[in-house]
Image (cartoon, coloured by chain):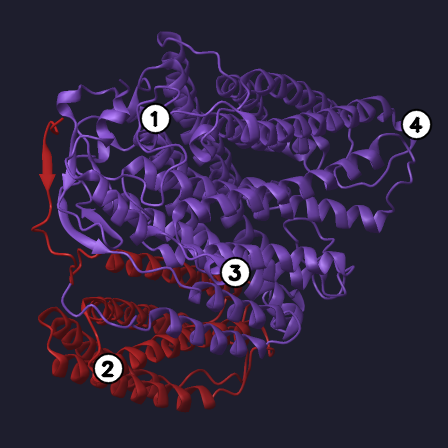
Chain colours: A red, B purple
Amino acid sequence: MTPASALDVGRLRPYEISNRAPLWWGQVILCAIEGSMFCILIAIYFYLRLRVDVWPPRGARLPDAAIASWALAPLILSMAGSYMASEAAKKDSRGGMIFGLAANLLLAGVFLVLRYLDWRGLNFNWASDAHGTVVWTILFLHTFDVVADLLMTLVLMIIIASGRYGPKQRLGVHVDSVVWYFLVAIWLPLYAVIVWAPRILGGGQ
Amino acid sequence: MSVSTEWRTHVAGEEGERHELERAWSERGGIAGWFSVTTHQAIGKRYIITAFIFLLLGGIEALLMRLQLARPDNGVLGPEKYNQIFTMHGTTMMFLFAVPMMEGMGVYLVPLMLGTRNVVFPRLNAFGYWMYLAGGLLLYGAAFSNTMPAAGWFSYTPLSGPQYSAGKGVDVWAQMITFTEISAMCVAAELIVTIFRLRAPGMSLARIPLFCWSMLIQSFMVIFAMPAVMLASTVLLLNDRTIGTHFVNPAEGGDPLLYQHIFWFFGHPEVYIIFIPALGMVSSLIEAHARRGVFGYPAVVLSMVANGFIAFGLWVHHMFATGLPQIAEAYFTAASMMIGITSAVQIFCWIATLWTGRLRLSAALHFVFGFIFIFVLGGMTGIMLASIPLDLQVHDTFFVVAHFHYVLIGGALFPLFGAFHHWFPKFTGRMIDERIGKVTFWILFTGFNLTFFPMHVLGLHGMARRIYTYPAEMGWGPANLLATIGAFTIALGGIIFMINVVRSMRAGAPASEDPWEAGTLEWAASSPPQNYNFVHLPVVGARYPLWADAAERAVVTGMRSDRREVLVTSGMEAEPEHRLVLPRSTPWPFLAALGFTIGLVGSVFSFSWYFISAALGAIGLIGWFWPHQPVEIDP
C-alpha cells in the first residue's frame, strides 16, 4: 500500500545554530523564570520601603554610585564578547568563539572585581534591618547567577579550545550568549533600584 | 480496517526502520540503566505512580483528621499531632500530588498527541523527576523522623517564624517547596518548547489538541507563578529563620503580610495550575466519548487563556480578612467574579458538545458528569466567597474548606480519574473494567458529597477550620460524623479503583491502538506506545487527524532512524524547519539532582550548604553537558 503522500524531510539540516533552535527557546524561558524572580524582588524592595519613614536607615552607607556606575562599562562591553562568540558559533569559527568567550569572561571578571569593591564598602549586612536584607538579597542572587553563568562559559570555552566539539557545542555557545545578555540587562533596573532609588526618591511614606 | 493501522503500515521497507528505531530508542537495562532513563513515557509513568503514592499518603492523613473530628471531644489525635497532620495533608496534596500528577500526565501524553518522539529536553525531564522525588522524600523522611511542619500548607508568618515554630519542621517544608517548584519549572520549560516546536507538520495552532493547549497555558503560569513561592518559602521564610534576615520581621522594618502577598501571588495561580490541565482532560474525554469535536474550540481555548491571565489578579481574595484598603479589595472582588465568566463559557461549550454528540456512557464520561456537577457547585460558593461581607463571615471556617474541596476534587480529581479510565488502554495496553469503573465513580461521587456538603453547613454554623476538636454543645457532631462516613466511603472507592487497575493490568482485554475511536494522535501509536511513539511521524491535515479522510493522511519520510531524531517545525503553522538529534540517555541528570539535593537538605541547617549545593550541582551539570565521545562533528 502506498502512502497518500509522504513529506520528505531528508534534505533538512540535522541541526540549527540560530534563534530557531529549540534550545534557544529553552534559554529564553529560563530567563523568563529568573526575570520574574527579580521583578518580584523589586516589588519586595518597594513594598518594604513604603512601610518606613526613613529609607535607608540613618547611617547606612549605600552602594557607591561611582563604582557601581563605572562597573557598568565592562559589563555592557562584555556583551560584545558573547555576541562575537555566538556569531562565530554560527560560522563555526573556532578562533572567533574562543576570542569572544575569553573577552566575555575577562570583562565580566573586571565587573566582578568592581562589584566586590562596592560590596565591601557597605556598612550593613543582611541581618541589619529590612533595607539591608533586601539589598543583600538582590546583590547575592544576581552575583550567584553571574558566577554560575561564567562558570558554564568557562567550561564551554575549554570544550571549544579542546577542539572536540560538534554542532551541539556550537549551539551551546550561541545560547549561552542569551543568558549573558539577560543577566546584564536585568542588572540595569536592579542597579537603578539599589543605587539610585534611595538617592532620588528619598525616604518612605 | 482501523484508521491508525493504515497510518502505521503504508511505507515500504518499514521493518528495517522499525528495527533501527528500536535500537536507537532502547534504554539500557540494570540499575544504572534505570537511573539513566529519559524517554517521556517512562518519566511520565514515574511521575504518575509517585504522585499517586503521595495521594494515598495525603488520603490517609485526611482519614486521620476525619476520625479525630467524627465526634465531639474526641481523643484520637492531640492538638499538636492534629496541626501536623493537617499541614502534611495540605502540603502533600498541593505540592506532592496535584501539580506533579498533572505534570506527569502532560509529560506522558503531550509528545504523543503532538505526533513526536519525546519531549524536546529529555534530560531536563529526567532531572525534574528526580528533584520532585527528592523533595517528597525530604518531607516524608523528616516526618518519619518526627520532624513535621505544623503551620498549615501556606505557613503564614509569624506562626511559622522562629518564635512560634521551633524545630526544623518549617525549614524542611520550605526547602521541599524548592524541590517541587524546580521540578515543575523543568516540565513547564520543556513542554512549552515541545508544544511550540515539535508539533507534527501541519498541526497549526488551531489544530493543537485541547489537552496540549491546557498544558501550554499551565506551563506559562508555572513560569510566572513558581518563582514567587520559591522567594516566599526559601528567601523570605527560610532565611528569616536560619540567617536572621528581616523580610517578615516587623521589629526591623519587615512585614508578615508581605509573605502572604508573595505566597498568594503564587498560591492563587497554583489552583489553576492544577485545574487547567484538568479542563484539557475534560475536553479530550468529552470529544472522544461524545464522538465529535468540542463545540466552540476557539472559545474554549481563549477561555483557558483568559483563566490563566485572570488567575494572576486574584490573590488578594485570600487576604480579605487582613485589613487591606477597601478600594483594593473591591478590585479583587470584581476580578474574582470575572473568573466565573470564562469558566462558564467552557461549561456551556462542553454541554453543547455533549448535547449534540453521540454519547458513549463510559466510566470516563461518568467522571466528566461528576466533574461538571461538583465543579459548578464549587464555582457557586466561589462567587459567594468573592464577596467581601460574606467572606469575612465565613473566613477560616469549614465553609471555605468545603468550597476548595469542591473546586479541587471536583475540578481536578474527578477529571483525573476520568483520564485514568480513558487513557488506561494507552498506558498499559489493556482495557480497564468499565463496570467496576462506573461503580468506582458512584462510590466516589456519593462519598465526596457526603464528606464535603455537610461542611458548608458546619462553616455557616461557625465551625472554624483547623480546630482539633469541639464541644458537644455546639451541635456539630452529627454533620461531622456524616463527613467522616463520607471520607471512608471515598477511601472505599479508592480501594476499588486500585483493585480494578491491578486486575485489568493482569487480565484486562488487550487494547487496540484506538479503542475509543478517538481523533487525536496519541491513539495512532500502539498501546502501550513504543519508546519512539511512531515509526513514521504523522503529517496532520485536520484538528482531529484520526477522524479525517484517508486521502488527507501523510507521513514524514527522510528522518534517520538509527539515532534519536525529532522534527522541529515552526511555531505557528508547524512547517518543517530542521531535524534535531536528541541526547542519549545518561545518569548525569540523576547525579546532578543528587548533588543539588545533598546541598539543599544541608541548607535546612546552615546557609553555607547552598555553596555545597552549587558546587555539587555544577559538577553534575558539567558531566551532563560534556560532549559524548565520539563527537558528531558533522552529522
Mark toward the start of the polypeptide (1 vs 3): 3
In the rendered image, which residue does mark 3 sit on?
B31
Asked which secondary structure carries label 4, the reply is helix
Asked which secondary structure carries label 1, the reply is helix
- Are tags 1 and 3 found on a single chain? yes
In the rendered image, which residue does mark 1 sit on?
B300
| Residue B199 percent coordinates (x, y) | 24, 41
The reply to whether residue B335 is in sight is: no
- Are tags 1 and 2 found on a single chain? no
| Residue B168 percent coordinates (x, y) | 72, 65
Q: CA distance from mark 2 to mark 4?
A: 74 Å
- Are tags 2 and 3 found on a single chain? no
Q: Nearer the viewer, mark 4 or mark 1?
A: 1
Q: Amino acid at mark 3?
A: Ile
Q: Amino acid at mark 1?
A: Val
In the rendered image, which residue does mark 2 sit on?
A104
Q: CA distance from mark 4 to mark 1?
A: 49 Å
What residue sits 72% from the left and 21% below the top?
B450
| Residue placed most toward the observer, B343 or A28 | A28
Q: Mark 1 touching mark 2, by CB under 8 A?
A: no
Q: Decide if residue B391 is on the left or right side of residue A77.
A: right
